[in-house]
Amino acid sequence: MTKPLRWKRVLLKLSGEALMGSQSFGIDPMVVERIAKEIADAVALGCQVGVVVGGGNIFRGVAVAAKGGNRVTGDHMGMLATIMNSLTLADALRRHKVQARVLSAVAVPSICETFSQRVAERYMEDGDVIVFAGGTGNPFFTTDSGAALRAAEMRCDAFLKGTQVDGIYSEDPKINPDAERYDTLRFEDVIQRNLKVMDTTAIALARDNNIPVIVFRIHEPGALVAVLQESGRYTVVG
Ligand code: UDP
């Protein structure tokens, strides 16, 4: 018998780098296909899924600012990068027979729909997967914050952060193999101990809206469904 889902409506956040695979830039189509399958499997079990993909595999505004460029222009370019990633993921989802919609915080009406909470709610109720593009639509924010905002607006039961590692550690486990891995943490622990999960704005938004944050490794086949069925390896921040 299929195990019941712990969370019925979720916001899945993927960094742009998650789409990069072993490349140093851009999008690896094989990785996108695999992630799309993970999402399709979750949808087949009745989960309502919203996805936010970052843009760091293509462009980050801070990189422009670091070289003396205009941060706002750089952030605009970063937001455009998230739209590119979102379009790719939505196409891959459609190949997996999932009805996918790209709703962007930045209006590019000849390419995708513009985000509106009411429209997004209707699509989610219908079981469509929404790929929220363009972050918050504002410079000086991150897609983690954009994802936390959408999770709150869409009243998601959980914020699932798919990363390269299987949870939150006391230190970077790649640098210190003896770093402690946590099963559960409180929001305050993450903020006070400055644990590298996501930026403080995003964590505070999740905390203020009582949305648990689950950190798991997205590159494990079946990882998303395992988290939804509470059988995977992950850290819950609540
Ligand atoms: N960005 C922005 N406002 C937002 C979200 C993103 O200006 O609300 C820009 C910013 O330049 C950021 C880039 O888009 O660096 C890509 O997003 P992010 O760094 O969050 O991507 P990730 O690290 O998740 O790949």
Image (tube, grey):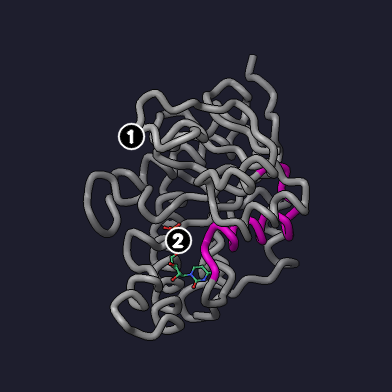
Left/right of residue 110 with respect to residue 59 in the rendered view: right
Instruction: Tally the numbered discs.
Output: 2
Name the residue located 51 percent from the left edge and 70 percent from the top edge.
134
Q: Amino acid at mark 2?
A: Ser
User: 34 or 174: nearer the eye?
Assistant: 174
Residue 144 at x, y = what percent?
55, 57
Is 92 within the magenta? Answer: no
> Disc 1 vs disc 2: which is toward the camera?
1
Q: Amino acid at mark 1?
A: Lys
Residue 70, quarter of the rendered image = bottom left
- In which quadrant is the N terminus drawn? top right
Considering the numbered disc 2 on the image, is that residue within a helix, a strand or a loop? helix
Name the residue located 41 percent from the left edge and 29 percent from the top edge.
221
Name the residue located 45 percent from the left edge and 34 percent from the top edge.
217
Residue 137 at x, y = what percent?
56, 75
Q: Is mark 1 within 8 Å of ligand 1?
A: no
Residue at the far left: name it.
Answer: 23
Residue 9 at x, y = what percent?
69, 44
Label the magenta part by its dominant secondary structure.
Answer: helix
- Extent of the magenta region: 141-158
Give the mark nearer the N terminus: 1 vs 2: 2
**Vertically, is 34 above or below 143?**
above
Considering the numbered disc 1 on the image, is that residue within a helix, a strand or a loop? loop
Q: CA distance from mark 1 to mark 2?
A: 29 Å
Q: Which residue is mark 2?
A: 86
Q: Which residue is mark 1?
A: 174
**Vertically, is 109 above or below 189?**
below
